[in-house]
Image (cartoon, helix red, strand yellow):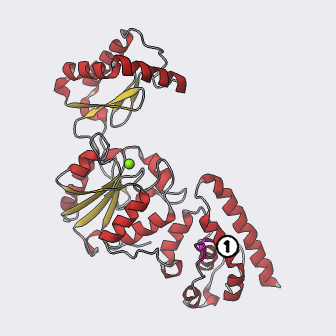
Amino acid sequence: MSFPDLKDRPLKDTICLFDVDETLTKARQSVKPEMLDLLLRLRQKCAIGYVGGSDLLKQQEQLGTPSIPVTTLFDFCFPENGLTAFRLGQPLTSTSFIQHLGQEKYQKLAKFCLRYISELEGLPAMTGTFIEFRNGMINVSPVGRNASKAQRDEFNAWDDKNNCRAKFVETLQKEFADLGLTFSIGGQISFDVFPTGWDKTYCLRHVENEKNVSGIEYKNIHFFGDKWFEGGNDHEIYEDPRTIGHAVRDPEHTMELVKELFQLPRQMAQLSDLPIEVLEIILQHLYISFIYTHDRSFFAVMEALPEGQAIGERLFYDTPDTSQWTVKERQWRPLDLEFAKRRHRYWASVWGMNWGLQEYTRVKRRSYERGRLWWQDGRR
Ligand SMILES: [Mg+2]
């Protein structure tokens, strides 16, 4: 799939940045093809990027597929709030908590925390991993990150009464005031420690640096996020004067806002209107993995027609010359529109299925079976 060069996009001084969980996808789930379709079309107009708190691996799982690196789907990828960054698929300089702080200061902090925990009285349990070292932060837990569900609940109840974490944080704030650290209590059993300013606004330095790379100055930086309120992890970037913040409820709401802001058609484009490269990307997100040749793309298109939608006649009539269709492993019968219409309902059902891994084998197997059906039909 090709995209205009960043400087050739119609809105070249505009970039849209998206949070991941509950903005592009449901929490911890995979992206829907409709969203990808929208992003692809948006990318024709302006630059797009995402900024997420977790690491690239997680985002690859949610937004990419085994054969499509997530870094090719966005112009800018900012895992870990941009501590790791990719521009047009290429990595930019990354940074880490330890690089920033230095081993000596870090050890002082780590030893202090461990000593503090060792002297806590009344802890309902102590497990393992009291300090978890992550790229952009450390996570400190008095009960230990190895705690079981029951131990977590127990600690949480105890902490509510004793304010253990709040007191701990207060002590650290006093003791390490000179390190410029932010402490954030979250979840049930721990708190995060990271350099002040290393929230999602961190990624804006990469966006701003674009003027030194390609000369583009992003004057309109749209940000879409669901945790925009005080205490949420989108709050800082949402409020930042450099961005135009958009508060979203869920991925559907994101799509609505984007369509409205950028005058993209409200309806998902007819599959038959999409260039074949776009289809390939969307279809690979359905884990249909055999659409590499021209004619097979058509086969896969059939597989993925949305429920109730008629097969796009244009798609087939536009086909340049069936004699040019190349087949590598199996000779598919060239698509016959009448045949397609007869099979329509059966094929269409795939679209309505869930996109999870469990469906992977089902979709794949069914496609294969239908591939054979098709083959037999063709020989008759
Ligand atoms: Mg979110």
In this rendering, does residue 211 appear at all? yes
Quarter of the figure with the N terminus: bottom left
Residue lying at the far right of the rendered structure = 380
Q: Is residue 78 visible?
A: no
In the rendered image, the vertical position of residue 110 relative to residue 186, given as above or below = above
Question: What residue appears at the point 61 percent right and 78 percent down from the top-left corner?
Answer: 298
* Percent position of residue 132, x then y: 41, 28
* Residue pointed to by mark 1: 347
For this view, does 331 lie left or right of residue 255?
right
Does the magenta portion include 306?
A: yes
Q: Looking at this view, name the residue that lies furthest to the front.
A: 161
Give x and y (percent) for residue 280.
Answer: 53, 70
Choose between 188 and 68: the one closer to the eye: 188
Please state the horizontal and vertical placement of residue 378, each as a whole percent of the image: 77, 83
Residue sitting nearer the eye, 277 or 170: 170
The answer to whether the residue bearing label 1 lies less than 8 angstroms from the nearest atom of ligand 1 is: no
Q: Is residue 345 left or right of residue 8?
A: right
What's under tag 1, amino acid-wise?
A: Trp
**Residue beneath the point at 35% across and 28% down:** 191
Q: Which residues are magenta?
A: 303-308
Lateral position of residue 333 relative to residue 298, left or right? right
Could you tell me what secondary structure mostly forms the magenta stretch? loop
Name the quadrant of the C terminus.
bottom right
On whether residue 78 falls in the magenta region, the answer is no
